[in-house]
Protein backbone atom coordinates (compact mmCIF):
# COMPACT_ATOMS: atom_id res chain seq x y z
CA UNK A 1 0.00 0.00 0.00
CA UNK A 2 1.30 3.44 -0.91
CA UNK A 3 2.38 5.86 1.74
CA UNK A 4 -0.30 8.31 2.93
CA UNK A 5 0.50 11.94 2.16
CA UNK A 6 -1.08 15.20 3.29
CA UNK A 7 -2.17 15.84 -0.32
CA UNK A 8 -4.12 12.60 -0.32
CA UNK A 9 -5.86 13.67 2.88
CA UNK A 10 -6.67 17.05 1.40
CA UNK A 11 -8.10 15.37 -1.70
CA UNK A 12 -10.27 13.08 0.42
CA UNK A 13 -11.55 15.97 2.54
CA UNK A 14 -12.45 17.98 -0.56
CA UNK A 15 -15.33 15.47 -0.89
CA UNK A 16 -16.81 16.54 2.45
CA UNK A 17 -19.23 19.46 2.41
CA UNK A 18 -20.28 21.76 5.20
CA UNK A 19 -23.98 20.78 5.48
CA UNK A 20 -25.08 24.38 6.00
CA UNK A 21 -22.95 26.11 3.39
CA UNK A 22 -22.93 23.36 0.74
CA UNK A 23 -19.23 23.89 -0.04
CA UNK A 24 -16.36 21.58 0.73
CA UNK A 25 -14.50 21.93 3.99
CA UNK A 26 -11.22 22.43 2.11
CA UNK A 27 -12.71 25.17 -0.07
CA UNK A 28 -14.03 26.91 3.03
CA UNK A 29 -10.58 26.76 4.64
CA UNK A 30 -11.91 24.73 7.53
CA UNK A 31 -9.11 22.13 7.46
CA UNK A 32 -5.76 23.04 9.00
CA UNK A 33 -2.57 21.42 10.32
CA UNK A 34 -2.83 18.07 8.53
CA UNK A 35 -0.17 15.69 9.80
CA UNK A 36 0.53 12.12 8.76
CA UNK A 37 2.65 9.52 10.50
CA UNK A 38 2.32 6.08 8.95
CA UNK A 39 -1.36 5.21 9.33
CA UNK A 40 -1.93 7.96 11.88
CA UNK A 41 -3.62 10.98 10.39
CA UNK A 42 -4.66 14.09 12.28
CA UNK A 43 -5.91 17.56 11.39
CA UNK A 44 -7.90 20.48 12.76
CA UNK A 45 -11.48 21.03 11.71
CA UNK A 46 -12.00 24.74 12.25
CA UNK A 47 -15.65 25.54 12.99
CA UNK A 48 -17.28 28.94 12.78
CA UNK A 49 -18.64 28.50 16.28
CA UNK A 50 -17.73 25.99 18.98
CA UNK A 51 -21.46 25.25 19.38
CA UNK A 52 -21.84 24.23 15.71
CA UNK A 53 -24.71 21.71 15.77
CA UNK A 54 -23.26 19.85 12.76
CA UNK A 55 -19.85 19.23 14.25
CA UNK A 56 -20.21 15.49 14.95
CA UNK A 57 -21.65 14.85 11.51
CA UNK A 58 -18.80 16.72 9.82
CA UNK A 59 -16.24 14.88 11.91
CA UNK A 60 -17.76 11.54 10.96
CA UNK A 61 -17.91 12.51 7.26
CA UNK A 62 -14.20 13.39 7.36
CA UNK A 63 -13.24 10.04 8.83
CA UNK A 64 -15.41 8.17 6.33
CA UNK A 65 -13.93 10.11 3.41
CA UNK A 66 -10.38 9.25 4.44
CA UNK A 67 -11.30 5.59 4.86
CA UNK A 68 -12.98 5.59 1.48
CA UNK A 69 -10.53 7.59 -0.64
CA UNK A 70 -7.20 7.00 1.10
CA UNK A 71 -6.89 4.01 3.36
CA UNK A 72 -9.50 1.98 5.12
CA UNK A 73 -7.09 1.37 8.03
CA UNK A 74 -6.08 4.95 8.63
CA UNK A 75 -6.36 6.00 12.27
CA UNK A 76 -7.90 9.41 12.02
CA UNK A 77 -7.93 12.06 14.76
CA UNK A 78 -10.06 15.14 14.10
CA UNK A 79 -9.38 18.07 16.40
CA UNK A 80 -12.44 20.30 16.57
CA UNK A 81 -11.49 23.92 17.08
CA UNK A 82 -13.07 27.25 16.30
CA UNK A 83 -11.63 30.51 15.18
CA UNK A 84 -11.88 33.14 17.81
CA UNK A 85 -13.69 36.07 16.29
CA UNK A 86 -12.28 39.26 17.71
CA UNK A 87 -15.46 41.22 18.35
CA UNK A 88 -14.76 44.77 19.45
CA UNK A 89 -15.97 45.48 22.97
CA UNK A 90 -19.08 47.68 22.58
CA UNK A 91 -18.01 49.81 25.53
CA UNK A 92 -14.81 50.80 23.68
CA UNK A 93 -16.72 51.71 20.55
CA UNK A 94 -19.13 54.04 22.30
CA UNK A 95 -17.03 55.80 24.92
CA UNK A 96 -19.42 58.76 25.14
CA UNK A 97 -22.50 56.77 26.07
CA UNK A 98 -23.04 56.18 29.78
CA UNK A 99 -26.14 53.98 29.68
CA UNK A 100 -28.04 52.23 26.92
CA UNK A 101 -31.62 51.16 27.56
CA UNK A 102 -33.36 48.81 25.13
CA UNK A 103 -37.13 49.20 24.86
CA UNK A 104 -38.39 45.87 23.58
CA UNK A 105 -41.57 43.91 23.07
CA UNK A 106 -42.49 40.50 21.77
CA UNK A 107 -45.24 41.92 19.60
CA UNK A 108 -45.62 45.03 17.48
CA UNK A 109 -48.36 47.53 18.20
CA UNK A 110 -48.16 47.30 21.99
CA UNK A 111 -46.78 50.82 22.33
CA UNK A 112 -43.04 50.22 22.28
CA UNK A 113 -42.28 53.36 20.30
CA UNK A 114 -44.71 55.39 22.38
CA UNK A 115 -42.94 54.27 25.55
CA UNK A 116 -39.43 54.70 24.09
CA UNK A 117 -40.16 58.24 22.88
CA UNK A 118 -41.84 59.42 26.06
CA UNK A 119 -39.26 57.73 28.25
CA UNK A 120 -36.56 59.62 26.33
CA UNK A 121 -38.44 62.89 26.76
CA UNK A 122 -39.02 62.27 30.48
CA UNK A 123 -35.37 61.36 31.07
CA UNK A 124 -34.37 64.60 29.33
CA UNK A 125 -36.73 66.50 31.64
CA UNK A 126 -34.70 65.28 34.62
CA UNK A 127 -31.75 67.17 33.13
CA UNK A 128 -30.03 64.18 31.56
CA UNK A 129 -28.45 64.18 28.10
CA UNK A 130 -30.55 61.79 26.06
CA UNK A 131 -30.24 60.02 22.71
CA UNK A 132 -32.90 57.95 21.00
CA UNK A 133 -32.31 55.29 18.33
CA UNK A 134 -35.20 53.99 16.28
CA UNK A 135 -33.94 50.51 15.41
CA UNK A 136 -37.33 49.17 14.35
CA UNK A 137 -36.53 48.11 10.80
CA UNK A 138 -40.05 46.76 10.34
CA UNK A 139 -41.77 50.03 11.16
CA UNK A 140 -39.58 53.01 12.05
CA UNK A 141 -41.83 55.57 13.67
CA UNK A 142 -39.56 58.19 15.21
CA UNK A 143 -39.47 60.37 12.07
CA UNK A 144 -43.24 60.83 12.39
CA UNK A 145 -43.40 60.93 16.17
CA UNK A 146 -40.86 63.79 16.21
CA UNK A 147 -41.79 65.22 12.85
CA UNK A 148 -38.24 65.02 11.44
CA UNK A 149 -36.99 63.40 8.26
CA UNK A 150 -33.83 62.21 6.60
CA UNK A 151 -33.08 65.59 5.00
CA UNK A 152 -32.10 66.75 8.45
CA UNK A 153 -29.19 64.27 8.61
CA UNK A 154 -25.60 65.48 8.17
CA UNK A 155 -22.26 63.74 8.01
CA UNK A 156 -19.27 64.68 10.12
CA UNK A 157 -15.65 63.61 9.99
CA UNK A 158 -13.99 62.01 13.00
CA UNK A 159 -10.58 60.35 12.79
CA UNK A 160 -10.77 60.18 9.00
CA UNK A 161 -14.17 58.49 8.97
CA UNK A 162 -17.54 59.98 8.15
CA UNK A 163 -20.24 59.54 10.76
CA UNK A 164 -23.90 60.49 10.74
CA UNK A 165 -24.84 63.20 13.17
CA UNK A 166 -28.11 62.67 15.05
CA UNK A 167 -30.87 65.22 14.59
CA UNK A 168 -31.68 67.18 17.70
CA UNK A 169 -35.28 67.90 18.64
CA UNK A 170 -36.74 68.90 22.01
CA UNK A 171 -33.19 68.51 23.37
CA UNK A 172 -33.01 64.83 22.36
CA UNK A 173 -30.56 63.44 19.83
CA UNK A 174 -32.41 61.26 17.34
CA UNK A 175 -31.34 58.60 14.88
CA UNK A 176 -33.72 56.36 12.93
CA UNK A 177 -33.55 53.62 10.33
CA UNK A 178 -36.32 55.70 8.81
CA UNK A 179 -33.68 58.39 8.03
CA UNK A 180 -31.70 55.91 5.93
CA UNK A 181 -34.57 54.56 3.87
CA UNK A 182 -38.15 55.37 3.14
CA UNK A 183 -40.09 54.18 6.21
CA UNK A 184 -42.85 52.95 3.89
CA UNK A 185 -40.40 50.57 2.26
CA UNK A 186 -38.79 49.34 5.45
CA UNK A 187 -41.61 46.87 5.93
CA UNK A 188 -40.74 44.89 2.83
CA UNK A 189 -36.97 44.82 3.25
CA UNK A 190 -35.31 41.54 2.94
CA UNK A 191 -33.37 40.47 6.00
CA UNK A 192 -29.82 41.28 4.82
CA UNK A 193 -30.73 44.78 3.63
CA UNK A 194 -32.45 45.54 6.85
CA UNK A 195 -29.63 44.31 9.04
CA UNK A 196 -27.08 46.16 6.86
CA UNK A 197 -28.84 49.49 7.37
CA UNK A 198 -29.25 48.74 11.04
CA UNK A 199 -25.58 47.94 11.50
CA UNK A 200 -24.69 51.21 9.77
CA UNK A 201 -27.05 53.08 12.05
CA UNK A 202 -25.55 51.52 15.15
CA UNK A 203 -21.89 51.81 14.26
CA UNK A 204 -21.70 54.93 12.10
CA UNK A 205 -23.53 57.46 14.23
CA UNK A 206 -21.51 60.01 16.14
CA UNK A 207 -22.86 60.41 19.66
CA UNK A 208 -21.54 63.18 21.84
CA UNK A 209 -21.84 62.84 25.59
CA UNK A 210 -25.02 60.87 26.30
CA UNK A 211 -26.29 59.88 29.75
CA UNK A 212 -29.09 57.66 28.47
CA UNK A 213 -29.37 56.20 25.00
CA UNK A 214 -32.88 54.78 24.54
CA UNK A 215 -33.29 52.18 21.78
CA UNK A 216 -36.70 51.53 20.21
CA UNK A 217 -36.18 47.87 19.28
CA UNK A 218 -37.84 45.92 16.47
CA UNK A 219 -40.57 43.65 17.90
CA UNK A 220 -39.70 40.02 18.52
CA UNK A 221 -36.94 37.88 19.95
CA UNK A 222 -34.76 36.86 17.02
CA UNK A 223 -31.37 37.43 15.43
CA UNK A 224 -31.91 41.12 14.74
CA UNK A 225 -32.65 41.79 18.40
CA UNK A 226 -29.56 39.84 19.41
CA UNK A 227 -27.36 41.76 16.97
CA UNK A 228 -28.47 45.06 18.46
CA UNK A 229 -28.08 43.77 21.99
CA UNK A 230 -24.52 42.67 21.24
CA UNK A 231 -23.43 45.71 19.21
CA UNK A 232 -24.34 48.34 21.78
CA UNK A 233 -23.00 48.60 25.34
CA UNK A 234 -26.38 47.72 26.86
CA UNK A 235 -27.18 48.55 30.48
CA UNK A 236 -30.58 46.87 30.57
CA UNK A 237 -33.84 46.21 28.78
CA UNK A 238 -37.39 47.37 29.37
CA UNK A 239 -40.20 45.17 28.10
CA UNK A 240 -43.45 46.79 27.04
CA UNK A 241 -46.73 44.89 27.01
CA UNK A 242 -50.45 45.38 27.16
CA UNK A 243 -52.24 43.56 30.00
CA UNK A 244 -53.72 41.06 27.53
CA UNK A 245 -53.00 37.43 28.22
CA UNK A 246 -51.97 36.74 24.63
CA UNK A 247 -49.29 39.42 24.91
CA UNK A 248 -47.84 38.01 28.11
CA UNK A 249 -46.39 34.86 26.54
CA UNK A 250 -44.23 37.16 24.41
CA UNK A 251 -43.12 39.03 27.50
CA UNK A 252 -41.86 35.81 29.05
CA UNK A 253 -40.00 35.01 25.82
CA UNK A 254 -38.43 38.46 25.89
CA UNK A 255 -37.23 38.04 29.46
CA UNK A 256 -35.78 34.65 28.61
CA UNK A 257 -33.90 36.07 25.64
CA UNK A 258 -32.26 38.90 27.60
CA UNK A 259 -31.53 36.80 30.67
CA UNK A 260 -30.05 33.94 28.66
CA UNK A 261 -26.55 33.47 30.11
CA UNK A 262 -24.97 34.05 26.67
CA UNK A 263 -26.67 37.45 26.41
CA UNK A 264 -26.76 38.46 30.05
CA UNK A 265 -28.72 41.68 29.72
CA UNK A 266 -30.54 42.68 32.91
CA UNK A 267 -34.27 43.30 32.56
CA UNK A 268 -34.83 46.68 34.21
CA UNK A 269 -38.58 46.12 34.31
CA UNK A 270 -41.92 45.98 32.55
CA UNK A 271 -44.10 48.81 31.36
CA UNK A 272 -47.79 47.97 31.22
CA UNK A 273 -49.18 50.05 28.38
CA UNK A 274 -52.88 50.60 27.72
CA UNK A 275 -53.31 49.41 31.30
CA UNK A 276 -56.76 51.01 31.46
CA UNK A 277 -58.87 53.52 29.54
CA UNK A 278 -59.71 56.86 31.05
CA UNK A 279 -62.06 59.18 29.16
CA UNK A 280 -60.86 62.79 29.24
CA UNK A 281 -64.17 63.98 30.68
CA UNK A 282 -64.16 61.37 33.48
CA UNK A 283 -60.54 61.43 34.64
CA UNK A 284 -61.22 59.31 37.73
CA UNK A 285 -62.84 56.43 35.87
CA UNK A 286 -60.77 53.47 34.77
CA UNK A 287 -61.96 50.84 32.34
CA UNK A 288 -59.85 47.72 32.01
CA UNK A 289 -60.35 47.06 28.32
CA UNK A 290 -57.48 44.64 27.87
CA UNK A 291 -57.93 42.89 31.20
CA UNK A 292 -56.80 44.01 34.60
CA UNK A 293 -53.14 44.16 35.56
CA UNK A 294 -52.02 41.12 33.56
CA UNK A 295 -48.55 42.56 33.17
CA UNK A 296 -48.32 43.71 36.81
CA UNK A 297 -49.18 40.22 38.03
CA UNK A 298 -46.63 38.66 35.71
CA UNK A 299 -44.00 41.10 37.01
CA UNK A 300 -44.67 39.90 40.56
CA UNK A 301 -44.51 36.25 39.53
CA UNK A 302 -41.23 36.72 37.69
CA UNK A 303 -39.76 39.01 40.34
CA UNK A 304 -39.32 41.83 37.86
CA UNK A 305 -40.00 45.48 38.61
CA UNK A 306 -43.13 47.09 37.20
CA UNK A 307 -41.77 50.44 36.08
CA UNK A 308 -45.16 51.93 35.43
CA UNK A 309 -48.65 51.70 33.99
CA UNK A 310 -49.67 53.89 31.08
CA UNK A 311 -53.35 54.60 30.49
CA UNK A 312 -54.98 54.24 27.10
CA UNK A 313 -55.88 57.81 26.25
CA UNK A 314 -56.65 59.67 23.08
CA UNK A 315 -53.96 62.29 23.65
CA UNK A 316 -51.25 59.61 23.49
CA UNK A 317 -52.52 58.30 20.18
CA UNK A 318 -52.82 61.83 18.79
CA UNK A 319 -49.40 62.89 19.97
CA UNK A 320 -47.90 60.00 18.02
CA UNK A 321 -49.02 61.62 14.79
CA UNK A 322 -48.54 65.28 15.67
CA UNK A 323 -44.78 65.11 16.25
CA UNK A 324 -45.15 66.29 19.86
CA UNK A 325 -44.76 63.54 22.46
CA UNK A 326 -47.24 63.84 25.40
CA UNK A 327 -44.44 63.78 27.94
CA UNK A 328 -43.04 67.13 26.74
CA UNK A 329 -42.96 70.12 29.09
CA UNK A 330 -46.31 71.71 29.63
CA UNK A 331 -47.56 74.29 32.11
CA UNK A 332 -49.44 71.66 34.07
CA UNK A 333 -48.35 68.07 34.37
CA UNK A 334 -51.00 65.77 32.87
CA UNK A 335 -51.80 62.22 34.04
CA UNK A 336 -50.03 61.01 30.87
CA UNK A 337 -46.86 63.02 31.41
CA UNK A 338 -46.80 61.93 35.04
CA UNK A 339 -47.20 58.27 34.11
CA UNK A 340 -44.17 58.49 31.81
CA UNK A 341 -42.16 60.44 34.37
CA UNK A 342 -42.76 57.63 36.83
CA UNK A 343 -41.41 55.14 34.29
CA UNK A 344 -38.32 57.32 33.79
CA UNK A 345 -37.68 57.70 37.51
CA UNK A 346 -38.13 54.00 38.19
CA UNK A 347 -35.78 53.22 35.30
CA UNK A 348 -33.11 55.49 36.76
CA UNK A 349 -33.60 53.78 40.14
CA UNK A 350 -33.15 50.32 38.58
CA UNK A 351 -29.97 51.45 36.83
CA UNK A 352 -28.62 52.81 40.12
CA UNK A 353 -29.39 49.48 41.79
CA UNK A 354 -27.46 47.65 39.05
CA UNK A 355 -24.49 49.94 39.53
CA UNK A 356 -24.37 49.17 43.25
CA UNK A 357 -24.25 45.42 42.58
N1 LIG B 1 -51.27 54.38 25.94
C1 LIG B 1 -51.75 54.62 24.73
N2 LIG B 1 -52.92 55.30 24.53
C2 LIG B 1 -53.40 55.52 23.31
N3 LIG B 1 -52.82 55.12 22.18
C3 LIG B 1 -51.65 54.46 22.29
C4 LIG B 1 -51.06 54.17 23.56
N4 LIG B 1 -49.89 53.52 23.34
C5 LIG B 1 -49.78 53.40 22.01
N5 LIG B 1 -50.81 53.94 21.37
C6 LIG B 1 -51.06 53.97 19.91
O1 LIG B 1 -51.03 52.63 19.46
C7 LIG B 1 -50.35 52.53 18.22
C8 LIG B 1 -49.16 51.59 18.36
O2 LIG B 1 -48.22 52.16 19.26
P1 LIG B 1 -46.66 52.14 18.94
O3 LIG B 1 -46.00 52.88 20.06
O4 LIG B 1 -46.40 52.60 17.57
O5 LIG B 1 -46.41 50.57 19.09
P2 LIG B 1 -45.15 49.67 18.68
O6 LIG B 1 -43.95 50.57 18.59
O7 LIG B 1 -45.05 48.66 19.78
O8 LIG B 1 -45.50 49.04 17.38
C9 LIG B 1 -49.94 53.95 17.84
O9 LIG B 1 -50.90 54.48 16.98
C10 LIG B 1 -49.95 54.70 19.18
O10 LIG B 1 -50.23 56.06 19.02
MG1 LIG C 1 -42.77 51.00 16.95
Image (cartoon, helix red, strand yellow):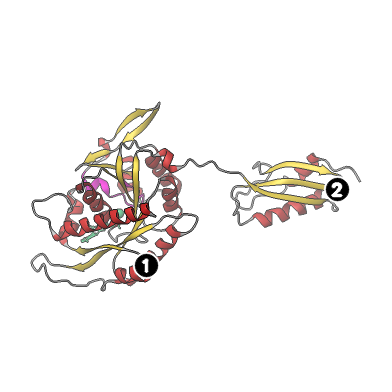
Secondary structure at numbered mark 1: loop
Between 258 and 354, the residue placed more toward the observer is: 354
Secondary structure at numbered mark 2: loop
Mark carried by residue 303: 1
Residue 242 horizontal/vertical position (percent): 29, 66
Mark pair 2, 1: CA separation = 60 Å
Residue 162 horizontal/vertical position (percent): 37, 30
- Few, some or many C-alpha atoms within 10 Å of disc 1 (few <14, some 14-19, many ≥20)? few
Please report the bounds of the magenta region as a residue range.
133-147
Between 335 and 113, the residue placed more toward the observer is: 335
Residue 112 horizontal/vertical position (percent): 30, 57
The residue at label 1 has a CB less than 8 Å from ligand 1: no
Answer with left or right where residue 305 lies relative to residue 1: left
Residue 131 horizontal/vertical position (percent): 29, 44
Residue holding disc 2: 39
Answer with left or right where residue 194 lies relative to residue 209: right
Amino acid sequence: MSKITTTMIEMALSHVDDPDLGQSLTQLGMIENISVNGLKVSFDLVLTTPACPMKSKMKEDCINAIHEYVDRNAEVTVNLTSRKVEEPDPADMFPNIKHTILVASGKGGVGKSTVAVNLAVSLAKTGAKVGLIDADIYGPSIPIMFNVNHQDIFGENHDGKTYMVPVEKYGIKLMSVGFLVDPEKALVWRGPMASGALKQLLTETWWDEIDYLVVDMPPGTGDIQLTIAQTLPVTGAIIVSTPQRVALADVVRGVEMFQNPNIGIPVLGFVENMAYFTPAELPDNRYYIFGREGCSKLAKEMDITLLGQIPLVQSIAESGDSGKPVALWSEQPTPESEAFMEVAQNTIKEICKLEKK
